[in-house]
Image (tube, rainbow, N blue to C red):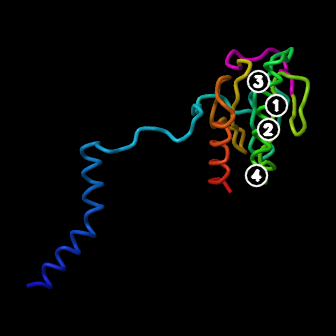
């Protein structure tokens, strides 16, 4: 009799995770609804190859941000902040390139490309996008997003995508 009770308790212990997860799914209780990424997912934004820039896919991750035509102090501060964030990636920094869209001046390790004709309406100065190696926009950040949040998302993506 004691052996049967032990077997029943062992089976219940092993079945508990399955029973709990089934209950969570059917009742929709206890399921996290928050995202991990701080940026906004933008699958409907066209790939970087279709932007009015003279850019070609290179198979690398790109951090693209829109600079004002005449880069003022705020623009330079954002460029410096993104440069520092890029350096903070450490040995992973070689896997990510920075592209300044609409600007002319460059910081070390950054490529600047002017718009071929006019900037698209969605290209607001200060916006930043994370672009995957195939040229698809993965995450978007507005001007007020701290570089620490971009850094956290970028390190997470680079760790997953080795």
Q: With 57 as the anchor, is 124 left or right in this view?
A: left
Residue beneath the point at 57% across and 31% down: 40
Task: Give the residue number, with chain letter if any, for mark 1.
Answer: 80
Q: CA distance from mark 4 to mark 3?
A: 23 Å
Kindly identify which residue carries mark 4: 92
Residue bounds of the magenta highlight: 113-123
Tell me whether the residue at label 4 lies in contact with that at label 3, contact meaning CB atoms closer than 8 angstroms: no
- For label 3, the residue is 66
Q: Which of labels 4 and 1 is toward the front? A: 1
- Whether the residues at callouts 4 and 1 have beta carbons within 8 Å, the answer is no
Spatial CA span between label 4 and label 2: 13 Å
What's the mark number on residue 84?
Answer: 2
Question: What residue is rendered at 24% in x and 51% in y?
Answer: 23
Q: Is residue 15 left or right of residue 53?
A: left
Which of the two discs, 4 and 2, labels the residue nearer the N terminus?
2
The CA span between labels 3 and 1 is: 14 Å
Tag 1, which secondary structure? Answer: helix
Residue at point 71%, 43% (across, down) = 134
Q: State which mark lies toward you, 3 or 1.
A: 1
Q: Earlier in the sequence, mark 4 or mark 3?
A: 3
Q: Residue 115, relative to residue 63: is it above or below?
A: above
């Amino acid at each position: 009799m004691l052996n049967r009770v032990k077997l029943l308790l062992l089976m219940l212990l092993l079945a508990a995770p399955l029973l709990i997860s089934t209950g969570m799914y059917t009742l929709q209780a206890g399921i996290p609804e928050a995202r991990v990424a701080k940026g906004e997912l933008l699958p409907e934004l066209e790939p970087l190859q279709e932007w009015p820039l003279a850019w070609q896919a290179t198979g690398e991750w790109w951090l693209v941000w829109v600079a004002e035509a005449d880069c003022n102090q705020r623009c330079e501060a954002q460029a410096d902040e993104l440069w520092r964030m890029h350096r903070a990636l450490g040995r992973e920094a070689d896997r990510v390139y920075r592209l300044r869209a609409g600007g002319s001046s460059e910081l070390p390790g950054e490529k600047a490309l002017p718009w071929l004709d006019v900037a698209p309406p969605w290209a607001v100065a200060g916006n930043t996008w994370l672009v995957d190696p195939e040229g698809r926009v993965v995450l978007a950040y507005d001007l007020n997003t701290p570089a620490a949040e971009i850094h956290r998302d970028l390190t997470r993506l680079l760790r997953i995508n080795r």
